[in-house]
Amino acid sequence: MRIAFIAHDKKKDDMIDFVKRYKDIFAEHQLFATGTTGKLLAEIVGMNVHRFLSGPLGGDQQIGAKVAQGELDFVIFLRDPLTSQPHEPDISALLRICDVHCVPLATNLGTAEVFLKAFKSHQELG
């Protein structure tokens, strides 16, 4: 699968911990991320990640374009719902494009956990 990661600043530590926990699963897939999130995943977790621009500089839109082109299968976007984001229109567009193209989108750790447990279960069966 082709999986994209995005995390707002206050959620980056959560993303790092999450990816570390499921590193064995993610290692079998093609990974993408916005700029800083991708840099942290590569440096701290040791994952091979294709990096786009930072979210506010167009990275969210780049990931949205990949979704629209059918080139991403799953997006994990740990959003900070308590902090105003200057690029909120880009965020809304990404959420919308995932809905339009029926691409699964996890916007919090609870949802991401459910998806990863399903992946793990599927791998064990297959």
Image: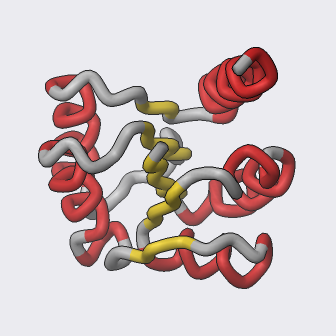
Q: How was this image coloured?
A: secondary structure
The image shows residue 61, relative to residue 79, as above or below, that is below
Picture quadrant of residue 105: top left
Measured from the top left, where is residue 18 in percent x and y? 76, 48
Q: Residue at x 28, y 57 (%)?
A: 63
Q: Residue furthest front?
A: 126
Left or right: 63, with 120 as reference point: left
The mark total stands at: 0
Name the one closer to the observer, 40 or 47: 47
Q: Residue at x 59, y 33 (%)?
A: 108
Name the one closer to the observer, 92 or 3: 3
Measured from the top left, where is residue 120 in percent x and y? 75, 27
Left or right: 27, with 5 as reference point: right
Measured from the top left, where is residue 52 in percent x and y? 35, 75
Quadrant of the rendering where the C terminus is positioned: top right
Q: Residue at x 67, y 34 (%)?
A: 109
Picture quadrant of residue 118: top right
Name the one closer to the observer, 22 or 125: 125
Measured from the top left, where is residue 11 in percent x and y? 64, 54
Left or right: 104, with 24 as reference point: left
Q: Residue at x 50, y 55 (%)?
A: 5
